[in-house]
Amino acid sequence: MTDFHVHLAVLVCLNVVIVSGLALISRTGQLSLGHGAFVGIAAYAAVLAHMKAGWPFWLSALGGIAAAALVALVLGWVILRLRGVYFVLVTFAFAELVRLALLDWSALTGGANGIAGIPPATLFGVAFDTKARFLVLALGVAAASAFFLKRLATTPTGHAYDAVSENPALAEASGLNVHRLQLQAFVIGCAIAGLGGVLLAHYVGFVSPESFNTTLSINVIVMLVIGGRQSVWGPLIGAAILTPLPELLRGAVQTQHIFYGAALILILHFMPGGLASLPGRFAKGR
Amino acid sequence: MDLSLLIGQAVVNGLVVGLLYLLMAVGFTLVFGVMRIVNFAHAEFYMLGAFVTFICVTRFELPFLPSVALTLVIAVLVGWVIEWAVLKPFRHDELNGMIATIGLAMILQNGALMLFGPDPQSMPSVATGVLRLGDLLVPNSRVYVVLCSAAVLLAMWLFLRYSRTGRALRAVVQDIEIAQIQGIKARLIYPLGFGLGVGLAAVAGGLMAPLFSVSPFIGAGPMLKAFIVVILGGLGSIPGAALASLLLGITESVAGTFLSTSTADILIFALVIGMLVVRPSGLLGRPE
């Protein structure tokens, strides 16, 4: 494995984490177009706590994740009473608000220049300062988040999420608190996105408002939909297939995005369950 | 310049952008009303409209107004075809339809990037001179664009209000099943509604092309504002969109005169999210 392959593997793992967060939100029938903003909120909060306030890595990471969760709680409480489409529009507008605020608040965030020279993550005295070492950390976290999703799917909470997404009115009528379940999923999903953001910031060593713009939010959606929204394998498959593509198609960014767009539409048309539904289709004996 | 004049000038400038937002928002809300799809490719139709008008004027040397009219015709046809070819399975499927338009937006924007390149281009102004309103100064090019935008909106309103097809469209917005029982052909109404919606976006792009520069990225700004407008005004409500567009255009322009533009934007976003706490369905939207 060359350095470049290790680098790609790290990015795949981090994307698995971020997409898993969105998968959880999507399980309750909501789609967030501001997922990238929560990755960014956690990344910035953790980096500032680490570099300006001198918190150790583990504490600043927790702080960053808590910041994303807290913002999700406040925003979600307000907007989850809205119907699905409003929710999407507001998350989109909110992400733009976050981007503008990061740009505008340059005394703290460095504005458009961002923050460079972020030190590598350090846990229990081990510095994850090479790509290979970081891969171990990223693999662990990606596995943990995938395992979390898989376990959750079989718990009563997981079933309740599915019920809410299938038919909110019916779920409400059978005694489920739809608003609370959706809020819970939104907060946890954003916290998981935050975990991905904190790791990403310390891996790349640099954050800027443009690292967390709409493009990131949309890429996360593309990965989730192409991988498969309903399956716990969806985030894994989507991240594993779509993360290396930009590197393979380097120098042809436009072609790559046209390909993404077309793939998105074709998958929605012919395979609403995403690539994760392929094995099931063959197993049905066709 | 004294304060009242400064505010007056800001209000006049705000009316111009307010009309731009209104053109975008009416098209957007029309598509949503008919198809229940949030069209994320709306910005790209604005951008393509600007390019079509730009090409008609600079390459084929057509006069401005016929170029805009041609842009409208092309956009309605293209919208019709796209609805039929891409969006048909997603009618009334809010979530998947919206994701499909995200894919569409990616294809259109990057296609434009390949065709036209990333650099902003500018086209000749449509009118010279300045209109004096008391102490206020308005460039004639802006007056011209404002009058054209208002004419397009008026025509659209008359069409939706009085024509048979317009009434059929509104019936579908109200209740698709009852509309079909009354003999309205959904297979014609859907592509027409989508075509008209994106046609309005394209006309907005064409009309604004002489005032701003033209590039594959110009759609994002007006699109975001159209989002804000429909959230503020109530999704699917055209009067709500009108009220919200003018409010937003003027607030933005006045706030931008005294604060920085980005601070004004942040303020507006915060206000809109705050308003949702009080009225979740927007100013004039109907609660569902």
Image (spheres, helix red, strand yellow):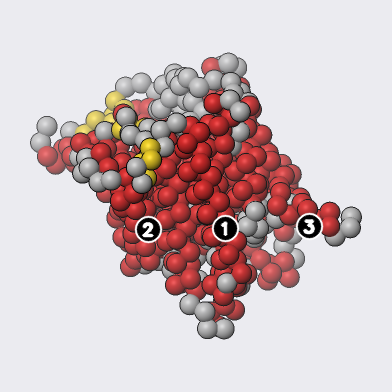
Q: Chain of mark 1?
A: A
Q: Earlier in the sequence, mark 3 or mark 2?
A: 2
Element class at badge 2? helix
Q: Is residue B199 visible?
A: no
Q: Are marks 1 and 2 on the same chain?
A: yes
Nearer to us in this view, B93 or B184: B93
Which residue occupies 29% across, 55% down?
Answer: B271
Nearer to us in this view, A164 or B142: A164
Q: What's the amino acid at mark 2? A: Ala
Q: Chain of mark 2?
A: A
Residue A132 numbered tag: none
Q: What's the amino acid at mark 1? A: Phe
- In the rendered view, would you say B119 is above or below B96? above
Nearer to us in this view, B122 or A12: A12
* Number of marks: 3
Choose mark 1 or mark 2, whichever is in front. 1
Q: Do the residues under discs 1 and 2 have CB atoms within 8 angstroms?
A: no
Residue A56 locus on image (x, y percent): 28, 45
| Residue furthest bottom as drawn | A174
Q: What's the amino acid at mark 3? A: Gly
On-image quarter of the N terminus of chain B: top left
Residue hosting label 3: A280
Choose mark 3 or mark 1, whichever is in front. 1
Which residue occupies 27% across, 42% down?
Answer: A50
Residue A69 numbered tag: 2
Residue hosting label 1: A147
Q: Is A68 displayed left or right of B23 in the figure? A: left
Q: Chain of mark 3?
A: A
Q: Are marks 3 and 2 on the same chain?
A: yes
Which residue occupies 47% across, 19% down?
Answer: B119
Which residue occupies 45% across, 67% down?
Answer: A184
